[in-house]
Amino acid sequence: MSNLLNQTGHRLDADQEKPRFLISDLCAYLESYLDSDQVREVYRAYLFGAEAHSGQHRKTGEPYIYHPVAVARILAEMRMDHNCLMAAILHDVIEDTPTAKEQLAGTFGVEIAELVDGVSKLSKIDFQSQAEAQAASLRKMLLAMTKDIRVIMIKLADRLHNMRTLGVMRPEKARRIARETLDIYAPIANRLGINSVRLELEDLGFAAYWPMRYRALRQAVSESRGQHKELVANVEAALLNRLEQEGMDGHVYGRQKHLYSIYRKMQEKNITFSDVVDVFAFRIIVDRLDTCYRVLGAIHNLYKPMPGRFKDYIAIPKANGYQSLHTVLFGPQGIPIEIQIRTEEMDRLSESGIAAHWMYKSGDSGGIAMSTRASDWLQNLLEMQQGVGDSVEFLEHVKVDLFPDEVYVFTPRGRILVLPKGATVVDFAYTVHTDVGNTCVAARVDRRLVPLRTRLRNGQTVEIINAENATPSPAWLNYVVTGKARANIRAFLKNLQGQVAVDLGRRLLERELKRFQISLDALGEEKIQQVLEEYRLESQDDLLAEIALGNRMPLLIARRLTGEDLATPVETAGTPGAESAGGLSIKGTEGMVVSFANCCRPIPGDPVMGVFNPGKGIVIHRHGCRNLGEFNKQGHNWIEAQWESDIEAEFATEIRVEAGNRRGVLGTVAATISEQGSNIENVTSQERDGLFSTLVFVITVKDRVHLAKIMRSLRVIPSVLKISRQSI
């Protein structure tokens, strides 16, 4: 039977025309770059894998071992080392056969066993949902990748072959796998610079997830290519002719932009296919770096460049190490064409990415640079995972860092940092160092002071101003975009909330124990342990945090600890004001375990009480607030509170200003509030009729005295008719 060869070099059966991945073909290919001893080791791994998978078949009907051999062939085309190829052939034996990791280590060595284990899913752990299981397995794989990058190389090759054979899957499962490929694996391939793998994963994922859109777009591109076939040939000839006239050697390749990138551009810019201006692209490959810039000048003289569409990725490479000059020109008939200019080395690296570290080991500087950039990203992953809780949260942070739109900014010393599009000053600070981010208080962009939420643009120089005692703010989470920044801020706030909760819980419990004439320290360890076991808590700190968060009532815990019955002591007869000297003292710095009710917006000077809200801690209300309901009748659900005498924090409150409906009245009122040292958080306007309107301001004040000062200053404005504070 005759055999054919497809574009990927796989042998095709002439009758069935589908790839066959034979170990003999793989070994013959490996002999082109591996030693004979190494090829024999790969064959030994094949024999072990074939025996382990004996009797297993894929949904295509083929013996299962075809899949691992196909994965190894993909990696061989990247010229990966023999240990990586052996691990690829064995990558499913731990997960899908009785083979243990220890057995692999004894037969093939610890290195290969670790690689195989890194790719294996966490299948022996029970998870609450499919999403959690998926996230945990991906987290395990990504962390294994930080120790050995070959883990992700094997996983990408595994996913690529699975995508090539996705047609046999049920439609819903095929769509789930395609979505995961587009969300995770294609972006990882892009982040590691492996362009050839990324493009195929994206197009296969696109075809499986949106099959009708894929077919329609493919048809549109095919028709467009047919209409412009002569134009493409003419542009190629014109570019080559100009290179010859300038005495420069180079190769010109006309190519069609791949379908998924066209689709994404249509989605992001909300445009139709006819509005996509650069469907056709040309790549010019030259011998030396300086020739790239000479070619750029020559083609700009041939066709007019489109303003604002030139990018120099040679001087400032992408985060994954990609280098090239990009420009868009007005071609024949005014049709825009994209031109990429690069050296042969840059072209190889753009296709191979991190794989260049293995493909070109002869001191290739580009491959080393790619490896360094990948290592930096992996280090960020390590830092990120230390500050997050569950695997789903970690995966969300990773996704943020995987998408490629970038901004290039400079440190004061001229170092270039690459950030995602939309990154802020805080993102920059965390990219420099975690400690720089945690303690940043202000920044200068191009020597001008700017707010921390300022979004950065290409070419700006950013200087961070730090304060030793500064800490991250919860508000930062509203505008940071990098996974590292988000993970570190959340980690800090979780630790802060935990410590604040423990301290507050201790104060609340000590207050109740005082009524039983005993302190927490005086209680025996045995009594505390009994209560911990009863509530299934691990430590005393956990119990105190539960009290502060409102999940456990301090009075009930005090009774359990003291062994008292449920009869309420005289001092705790739920009357507001009882035992007020032992009430909760509010400083305004308790963090998230003490919050202030939006219904009445209490401020220092108001008589207040606290209500336990499970999961949220204590919510402070003004006395008489209509939303307190029956809490006054439930002594164990509320706590008397009072303000500290030296509070420096600011608190939000609401005022209503009724004014004549005249031009400029809102600006006058706002300016007056600002002059009194208050910040306006929100304002709404309600027009009662054509003559009068009601302005509702949410402002920050220090206390009742500060509020009274603001209200007095507003009363003297001629247009203001009435001022009142939010009612309770």
Image: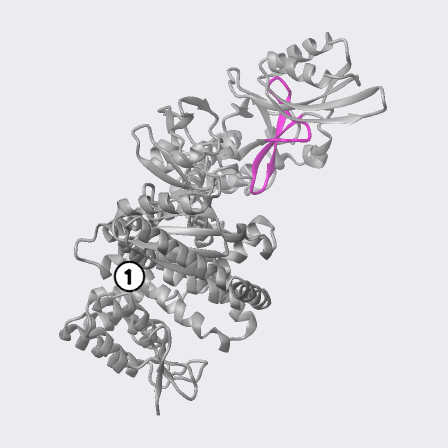
Q: Which residue is denoted by mark 1 in the rendering?
A: 150
Residue at (29% x, 58% y) in the render: 348
Q: Determine if the magenta segment contains residue 611.
A: yes
**For the residue carrying disc 1, how many other residues have a C-alpha within 10 Å: few (<14), some (14-19), or many (20+)?**
many
Q: State whether residue 321 is above or below residue 667.
A: below
- Residue 315 image point, x, y percent: 32, 41
Which residue is more in the foreground, 719 or 283? 283
User: Where does the magenta region start and end?
Assistant: 596-622
Residue at the extreme front of the image, as rendered: 245
Residue at the extreme bottom of the image, as rendered: 1
216 vs 423, left or right, is right
- Residue 84 image point, x, y percent: 25, 66
Q: State whether residue 677 is above or below residue 53.
A: above
Which residue is more in the foreground, 70 or 193? 193
Q: Quadrant of residue 654?
A: top right
Which residue is more in the foreground, 160 or 441? 160
- Inspect the image, locate mark 1, and give the three-letter code of the amino acid beneath it: Arg
Q: Determine if the magenta segment contains residue 293.
A: no
Quadrant containing the C terminus is top right
- Residue 70 image point, x, y percent: 34, 75
Q: State whether residue 78 is above or below residue 57.
A: above
Q: State whether residue 237 is above or below residue 690.
A: below
- Residue 606 image point, x, y percent: 64, 20
- Residue 128 appears anywhere in the view: no
717 vs 2, left or right, is right
Q: Quadrant of residue 170?
A: bottom right
Q: Secondary structure at mark 1?
A: helix
